[in-house]
Amino acid sequence: MDMDFGLLAQETVELSNILRKQKQLLDEIDPVFAEAENTNFESTTTKSEKSFTPSAKPGIIFVLEKGGHTFCVRGFATSNLRFRYQQINNYRDEEAFYRLKIDKDSDPSEIQYYETDTVEKADKIVKHMINRRFPIQEDVICNISDPGFSWWYDDSDDRITLFFKSHGIDRAQNLMQLGPVGDHRKAGIYFNQVFKLYGLLFPVKEFSCTSKSLSIRTSDPSSATFRMFRRIFLEGINEFELDYPFNVPIYAEFWHYLDQIAAFRKFWLHVFDLVLEDDQNGQAYIQ
């Protein structure tokens, strides 16, 4: 198939510009996050420079498979990253090679790992996101009739607005793409059934939730718990504990739902950074 590499290069630049703007928005939303990013910038290494020394924690071993305008993550969950990685490195793990769809002559640096708190969380990420093919530029490939897989985020100082799927065009210009962080068919039900919870966490001025979107406005944008709630969707970090008000059974179930959204979001940020890293190294769109 003939490919217009000039057009692909132009699209890559446009994607980088959009994501740069989204990163600037994220920094403006949460200066603490921006400061942490800047502190860690000098110690950050690229995939090719990274020394593979996984811990013995649970997590996911995976490879990033790219082709054309799409990418796919092949991988599996494990209760001990270090042991499984050493087995792969010593050519003793035939099952791993099969599940990663690589052979023993593959470059070891292509094998990635991702730590999780528990193997159960790793299993959920694998079930939801592994072996699925995603477009690199979702809003270019998807259209009004095909809204795609991502949730989208619209930000203001005192409001959190989530779109569980977007039917709009040029969505990446106006919204922040959160990735496949949840099932859009169930999201409205989950957020609606605990509508009283939000008022226990922070002052709520307005609340609206449908099968398509969630909008919560607070009268106190400086509220610590409002910022904590926001970080779940932006950074994939759940700082809430299973104490009041989450010790009430229905709210405890919702806590686990939020924790799952955070896990999916954080893994998506990690993987998409690798996708962009390949683009910047001139390795994008290899078939």
Image (spheres, rainbow, N blue to C red):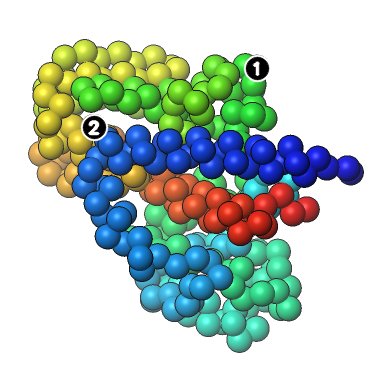
Which amino acid, mark 1? Ser
From the top left corner, tell me how far across and down residue 195 is, in percent.
23, 20
Apparent side of residue 167 relative to residue 114 in the rendered image (left or right): right
Quarter of the figure with the N terminus: top right
Give the vertical position of 180 relative to 87 (above or below): above
| Measured Cα–Cα span from mark 2 to mark 1 | 35 Å
Q: Name the quadrant containing residue 178.
A: top left
Q: Which residue is found at the position 31% from the left and 62% from the top?
A: 40
Give the vertical position of 221 relative to 283 (above or below): above
The residue labelled by disc 2 is 250
N-term-proximal mark, 2 vs 1 = 1
From the top left corner, tell me how far across and down residue 170 is, in percent.
56, 22
Q: Which mark is residue 145?
A: 1
From the top left corner, tell me how far across and down residue 59 is, in percent.
44, 64
Secondary structure beneath label 1: loop
User: Would you say residue 274 is visible in this rendering?
Assistant: yes
Which amino acid, mark 2? Ile
Dot 2: within a 10 Å radius of its alpha carbon, few (fewer than 14), some, or many (20 or more) residues?
A: few
Apparent side of residue 138 relative to residue 245 in the rendered image (left or right): right
Residue that protrudes farthest toward the bottom in the picture:
90
Apparent side of residue 139 relative to residue 68 in the rendered image (left or right): left
Q: Along the line of sight, which residue is nearer the eye, 170 or 152?
A: 170
